[in-house]
Amino acid sequence: MPSDPQVLAALANVTGALPSAEDRPGQQQMAEAVADAIARGRHLVVQAGTGTGKTIGYLVPTILAGQTVVVATATKALQDQLASKDLPFLQLHLGQRFDFAVLKGRSNYVCMQRVRELQDKDTGQLEMEEFAATTKVEINRLVAWAGSTTTGDQADLSWAPQDRAWQAVSVGSDECPGAKRCPMGDVCFAEAARERAAAADVIVVNMHLYGLHVGSGGMILPEHDVVIVDEAHQLEDIMSDTVGVEIGGGRFTTLTAALKHILTDPAVTAPIAEASTLVRDTLAPRLGERLSVPLPAQVSETLVTLRGRLQKAQDALRAIETDVAEAQQRKLRAVQLTTRLQESLDLALGELDGYVPFVSGGPDYPRLEIAPLDVGNVLANGIWSQRTGILTSATIPTSLGARVGLPAATFTELDVGSPFDYEHHALLYCALHLPDPRDAKYAAGVQDELVSLIGAAGGRTLALFTSWKAMDAAAEAVKARVDVPVLTQRDLPKTALVKAFSEDEHACLFATAGFFQGVDIPGRTLSLVTIDRIPFPRPDDPLLSARRELLGPAAFGQIDIPRASMLLAQAVGRLIRTANDRGVVAVFDRRLGTANYRWDIVKALPPMQRTRHREEAEAFLREITSG
């Protein structure tokens, strides 16, 4: 690939304006590859390790190309970073004019029609008899805010309302009749956001919204030439969630509330209200199960019963004739919700060819999920055949391209590495002397390892576990044997927990899979990351088990090893966050050093020195934490 002087010059100008400007060859390589991919209309899958500066690496060449781009992120934190930091910075320093917009799902914006309906025309007071006193106070605050906000975006609130209060002043996409059929369509915040997005050069969304866009046949987002998928390792799972169907009691609860705003006949509304209990009683005994196709008789019978109740509600709604604008809107929203739920039930009661039905959630709120067996075809038709795709992450599973439907001849794979000196700054210790994780003596062995390593590190430890049970047992045992604070994931919300850990250099934090990614704690506060087991996906996961059956003997290599490698690499990535960080990663699963697939996993990790001797790990920890 030839050098691109324009891209490199622009990148140099931009990075030179950063407070801590430094030369990043991986970022330059990535920027040139993105420019080349866009110019040739060829898809690109690029692994850019921590510290590469991948966001700037893909934004600069894309904006210079002058094409409309959608950036789809997996996390709200990354979406906010793009909108509040990276894109405004580029507007100042890139030297090319461009506009950007953030677009979220409709339920993220206050609905002025809902606000209007809450207000009594004669008194101007809010009609809120159905709400609790505390909820009424919050709704009053939200209504006042709706009159002053310029965006209507919940994220712009300076406080966090209860879900019930926010739901009173917002609508979901299944509920909204559309701007043209709404009296307040001209001042709709969601529509205004869509209009800004339609005029923008760069549109930032989350992957869930992009999945809804694909599932709707391209009806949600503006036309665009390029899609950049950041944190692309999550693309397959998120797309499975969004282009499939979910039926749970919550949808009937939402519909009941909408019906009660327009229908007074309990013979119609009561059966819908009772539907959530019927859904729970039918699905809870099958929690975690993959269901047969066609669906089991009891499940089918329940869905048919629910379909009949919905039809009665639909008939009652269509019989309503009114000239009152607010009543018309309530009717439209109820019709919309009922229709969407009917469509979901119809799909579930259909042939389900190419779909996997299973029951997820918890015993109180089980859900019937119907996910596509293979999202590749959906993505190939809905994305890759229509525009250039740039897929990037710090960790890319080896089978990603095939799993998300990229035809082999249409994309380039690239690994630009990381600028961090892992070879000298990080040590990977595998405790080969421990028993197999399935052995009864394994848990006690892990606890002994933790006590010794935490002692050598003087705390400063993020201990990660693949189950809550293992985390709880280890935390209870270790707390009594170390003289440093031990925090666990049960103590505080995630943000507060990370803050508490960051502010006490000698603290330890014991956590589960939710902390394998999205945790950024630079400096000596985090000098040791431990992982109890190689994080293989559950063998009984309903959707993955169906995909394994489809692949046969190749499944372990194409599904389990890539997923485990990716998650382990994500966990390892918590350690080195800046060029000056140093530390140890300890894996207490002997299979990392003995199994015949071990090199497939090790190759996915940063190029750290390796040892099987705990004394070497302890010596390294004492060296980097002394003084």
Image (cartoon, rainbow, N blue to C red):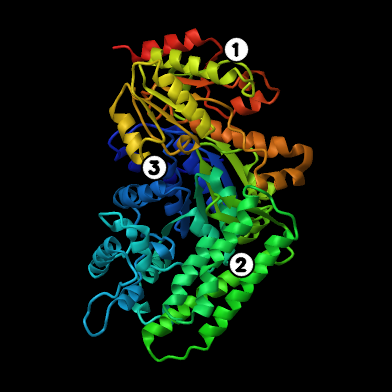
Relative horizontal placement of residue 272, taking residue 190 as reference (left or right): right
Mark 3 vs mark 2: give the one in front: 2
Secondary structure at numbered mark 2: helix
Secondary structure at numbered mark 3: helix
| Mark 3 or mark 2: whose residue is earlier in sequence | 3
Quadrant of residue 545 in the image?
A: top right
Secondary structure at numbered mark 1: loop
Of 151 and 316, nearer the camera is 316
Location of residue 515 in the rendering, given as x and y in whole percent from the top left corner: 45, 36
Location of residue 325 in the rendering, given as x and y in whole percent from the top left corner: 37, 86
Give the residue at mark 3: 11
Give the residue at mark 2: 344
Query: Around disc 3, counting alpha carbons within 10 Å, would you say few (fewer than 14), some (14 to 19), or many (20 or more)?
Result: many
Q: Does any portion of residue 308 appear in the rendered image?
A: yes
Of 199 and 60, nearer the camera is 199
CA gap, disc 1 and disc 3: 49 Å
Q: Does any portion of residue 222 appear in the rendered image?
A: no
